[in-house]
Amino acid sequence: MEFSEFKQTTGVQTPPKICLFEGEEVYLAEDGLKHLLETFVDFPEMDFARLDGEDVLPSDLVTQALSFPFMSRKRLVAVTEFYPTASMINGVLKDMFSGLPDSTIVAILNRKSCDALKKQKSVTTVSCVKQQPAFLSKWIVKEFSRFDKTITASLANKIVEYSLMDM
């Protein structure tokens, strides 16, 4: 699924239970995570957990994922740079991939591809690759507005042009 499609459909439709944000554009993955958080979690201090995939034990991830929300519609568990093997998915992580409650969303934010995750039917992959200039311009304008700053579309386009030349 393309990132723009994810943003348009999430909130209108039932969200994916396990969402894999994959690609080098980290800002898109973080924006997708923020979108899930703002849309489905009312009390992030109680119903949001963020784990680092390099340091997390699979059993800890399963425990977080199988917990129910306390004060929000959904519980959101985010894990970064998580690359499980097929044997891990069929072993210690099996309960998470097959029996995740409807009240929980697991967001996995990976820069590199993980075929073992992509093969799972319960995982929705969101592509976080280089975007079109029009999308980037809109994103820049939105980010400026978050900090109560305004920027014209033409200036945002100039920033995009400059940035794309450098990449």
Image (cartoon, rainbow, N blue to C red):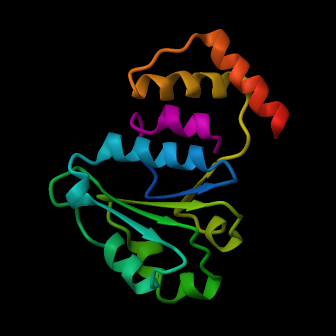
Q: Which x, y percent locates residue 151?
A: 54, 14
Q: Which x, y percent locates residue 85?
A: 64, 82
Q: Quadrant of residue 67?
A: bottom left
Please give left or right for residue 139 compared with residue 61 in the image: right
> What residue sits 42% from the left and 75% below the top?
96
Q: Quadrant of the C terminus?
A: top right
Residue 14 visible within the image: no
| Region of the chain picked out in magenta, as a range | 1-14
Which one is nearer the viewer's eye here, 69 or 164?
164
> What residue sits 62% from the left and 74% below the top?
83
Q: Which x, y percent locates residue 163?
A: 75, 32
Please give left or right for residue 166 compared with residue 14 in the image: right
Q: Quadrant of the N terminus?
A: top right
Please determine whether, in this image, residue 10 is positioned above or below residue 76.
Answer: above
> What residue sits 47% from the left and 81% below the top?
94
Is 42 contained in the magenta span?
no
Please determine whether, in this image, residue 10 is positioned above or below residue 20.
Answer: above
> What residue sits 57% from the left and 64% below the top?
121
Is 8 contained in the magenta span?
yes
Q: Residue furthest left?
A: 71
Which one is nearer the viewer's eye here, 10 or 43?
43
Residue 98 visible within the image: yes
Q: Which x, y percent locates residue 82?
A: 57, 72
